Structures are given as structure tokens and as C-alpha cells.
């Protein structure tokens, strides 16, 4: 092979090497066109992954109709404020709450369709303002393997932020407001352990100022713990 042929052969070999290298790069990782990526998780309309969604219990429409029909027959039909579904932390069954048109009482019905309980307006008016207390019955539930009470708090002249006992904080949910005796009352839901009966500290706000109040939660009237 003469010198010119040798040069031509070397050039051709170099071009082939460059083409092979370019082809290999096009299939490498790092964001090139040939790279593969895992498909994105499906999202809800709110933009959250479906896997993270939780199903919240609802108040069955058939039970709701039956409860309200019975309430109307007993003179406990809701007033202009209508009916509100109250939820509890922990995904426990919700309740219905309303103020009656006839007397201004505040009534609550459970999802099991049992008897509706009402707190008389005349009794609510006697509660201190400002102040907070429990109302109506407690419901025993299972909460992460531990028995607990669902509790309704009613406050006037202050807003409740949380309750606590023995360095444990328990969140509250604002559920319902109604005027009774010319004073706006607010009902909150909370859930507390069955084995923690006592005089709970209540963090409240009065006229925008943070203060401490208290409420006794002891449905079974047993020896109370020191909160």
C-alpha cells in the first residue's frame, strides 16, 4: 500500500469511529432524547397523588332523611340555618347538627340513626360567657387500637384552638355556630382517650388575645387524672 492509500484508509477509519461514538451517545442517560423516564403517578384534579388520598366517612343520605323526618314529627325541625355535618379527627363517623326552628335548641343525630339528642336553649343560655363546656352525650369509639371518646364542646365569647392533658394536645374542629339568647355559640368536635379523664386545659382566644380556660371531660365519672 502506498502512502496516499494509507492516508485515505486512516481517514475512512476515523470517520467510522466517530459515527459509532455518536450513535452510542444518543442512547445514554442524562436527559438525552433516547433516555427513558418512569411515568408520573396519576393525580387528582387537585394535583395530589391518588395514592395519598383518604376516604372520609359520610352521613348516608337515607339516614339523613329518616332523622330529619323524625325530627319534624317531634317539633325539632331545623331552622333557617339548615343542617351541618360535623366531622371528627381520626375519620370517625360524622354527626348531624342543627338549631331547631321552634325553640332554638341545638340538636345532634348520630350516623347510626338512633335517637336525636337536643340541648335546650334555656340551659345553653345559663352557660357562662365567656366560657367553654361539653354538651350532649359522648360516643365511645376505637381510635388506633385505643378506646376514645368523641366530645362536643360549646363555647361563647371565645374561640377554642386546642385542648390538652398530661402534655398531650388534642386538636378541635369548628363545626357549628348559632345564636342562643342573643349570644353567638360555637360547637367544636374533639376526640380524647378514654383512659384520660380529667380537667383539660383549653387554649382559647378572647378578643384576639391567647388565654387558657378549662373543661372537665369525664363521661364515666371515675377518678380523674391530674392534667
Image (cartoon, rainbow, N blue to C red):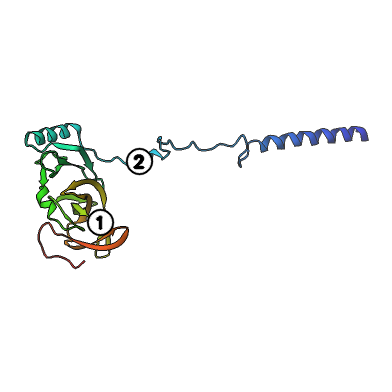
How many numbered marks are there?
2
Q: Residue at x 22, y 40 (%)?
A: 84
Residue at (42% x, 36% y) in the render: 43
Q: Quadrant of residue 227?
A: bottom left
Left or right? Give the position of 32 relative to 6.
Answer: left
Residue at the disc numbered 2: 53
Depth-wise, is mark 1 or mark 2 nearer the camera?
1
Choose between 226 and 51: the one closer to the eye. Answer: 226
Q: Left or right of 170: which side holds 127?
A: left
**Mark 1 vs 2: CB contact within 8 A:** no
Which is more toward the observer, 108 or 44?
108
Q: Position of residue 119 (x, y in %)?
A: 11, 48
Quarter of the picture containing the N terminus is top right
Q: Position of residue 68 (x, y in %)?
A: 13, 34
Q: Describe the element under mark 1 as helix, strand or loop.
A: loop
Label 1 vs label 2: CA separation?
Answer: 34 Å
Could you say which is closer to the camera, residue 59 or residue 154? 154
For residue 227, above or below residue 140: below
- Which residue is depicted at the point 19% across and 47% down? 179
Position in image of residue 14 (x %, y %): 80, 36
N-term mark: 1 or 2: 2
Q: Residue at x 23, y 62 (%)?
A: 213
* Residue at the disc numbered 1: 158
Residue 98 percent location from the top left of the image: 17, 41
Mark 1, other Cα within 10 Å: few <14 / some 14–19 / many ≥20: many
Amino acid at each position: 500500500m502506498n502512502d496516499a492509500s494509507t492516508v485515505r484508509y486512516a481517514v475512512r477509519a476515523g470517520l467510522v469511529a466517530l459515527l459509532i461514538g455518536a450513535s452510542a451517545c444518543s442512547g445514554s442517560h442524562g436527559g438525552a432524547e433516547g433516555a427513558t423516564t418512569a411515568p408520573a403517578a396519576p393525580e387528582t384534579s387537585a394535583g395530589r397523588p391518588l395514592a395519598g388520598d383518604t376516604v372520609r366517612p359520610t352521613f348516608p343520605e337515607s339516614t339523613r332523611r329518616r332523622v330529619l323526618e323524625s325530627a319534624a314529627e317531634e317539633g325539632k325541625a331545623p331552622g333557617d340555618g339548615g343542617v351541618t355535618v360535623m366531622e371528627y379527627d381520626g375519620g370517625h363517623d360524622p354527626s348531624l347538627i342543627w338549631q331547631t326552628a321552634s325553640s332554638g335548641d341545638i340538636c345532634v343525630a348520630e350516623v347510626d340513626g338512633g335517637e336525636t339528642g337536643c340541648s335546650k336553649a334555656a340551659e345553653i343560655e345559663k352557660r357562662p360567657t365567656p366560657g367553654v363546656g361539653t354538651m350532649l352525650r359522648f360516643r365511645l369509639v376505637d381510635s388506633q387500637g385505643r378506646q376514645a371518646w368523641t366530645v362536643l364542646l360549646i363555647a361563647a365569647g371565645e374561640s377554642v384552638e386546642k385542648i390538652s392533658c398530661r402534655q398531650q394536645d388534642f386538636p378541635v374542629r369548628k363545626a357549628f355556630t348559632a345564636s342562643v339568647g342573643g349570644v353567638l355559640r360555637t360547637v367544636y368536635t374533639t376526640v380524647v382517650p378514654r383512659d384520660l379523664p380529667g380537667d383539660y386545659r383549653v387554649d382559647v382566644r378572647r378578643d384576639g388575645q391567647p388565654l387558657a380556660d378549662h373543661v372537665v371531660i369525664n363521661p364515666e365519672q371515675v377518678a380523674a387524672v391530674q392534667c
